């Protein structure tokens, strides 16, 4: 696996996405494993993975996120 010279992280293990929520908020550079990108329903798999991350974050912080409106790839 190639290394990204800037971050020294392995390239190809994950993809980055910005997430837009229905309430107008946004989170940037959310990591999604490359395995999720190989699914038949790629968009659904990505959104499902990010929703699960949001649930875990909400459990830990006590603050829930809104409903995901859109998922945008970073750097494309």
Image (spheres, rainbow, N blue to C red):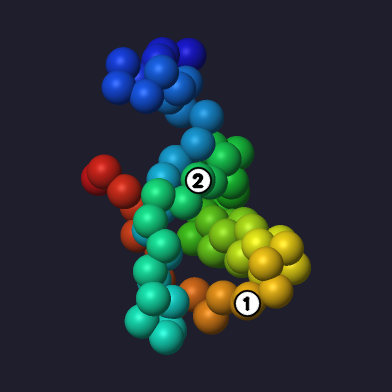
Is residue 59 visible in the rendered structure shown here? yes
Q: Residues within 10 Å of mark 2 (few under 14, many from 20)?
A: some
Choose between 11 and 41: the one closer to the eye: 11
Q: Residue furthest bottom?
A: 23
- Asked which quadrant contains residue 28, the reply is bottom left
Viewer-side label of 2, 1 = 1
Q: Is residue 3 left or right of residue 51?
A: left
| Label 1 sits on residue | 64
Q: Is residue 44 left or right of residue 22?
A: right
Q: Position of residue 65 (x, y in %)?
A: 56, 75
Choose between 9 and 33: the one closer to the eye: 9
**Identity of the residue drawn at 47% across and 21% down:** 10
Query: Circle 1 sits in a helix, a strand or a loop, which is it?
Result: loop
Q: Residues within 10 Å of mark 1 (few under 14, many from 20)?
A: few
Query: Circle 2 sits in a helix, a strand or a loop, which is it?
Result: strand
Q: Position of residue 22 (x, y in %)?
A: 43, 84
**Identity of the residue drawn at 54% across and 63% down:** 47
**Identity of the residue drawn at 57% across and 40% down:** 33
**Identity of the residue drawn at 49% across and 75% down:** 68
Q: Position of residue 40 (x, y in %)?
A: 57, 52
């Amino acid at each position: 696996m190639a290394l990204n010279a800037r971050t020294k992280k392995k390239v190809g293990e994950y993809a980055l996405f910005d997430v837009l929520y229905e309430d107008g908020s946004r989170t940037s550079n959310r990591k999604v494993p490359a395995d999720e990108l190989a699914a038949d329903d790629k968009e659904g798999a990505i959104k499902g993975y990010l929703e699960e991350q949001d649930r875990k974050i909400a459990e830990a912080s006590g603050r829930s996120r809104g409903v995901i409106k859109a998922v945008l790839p970073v750097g494309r």
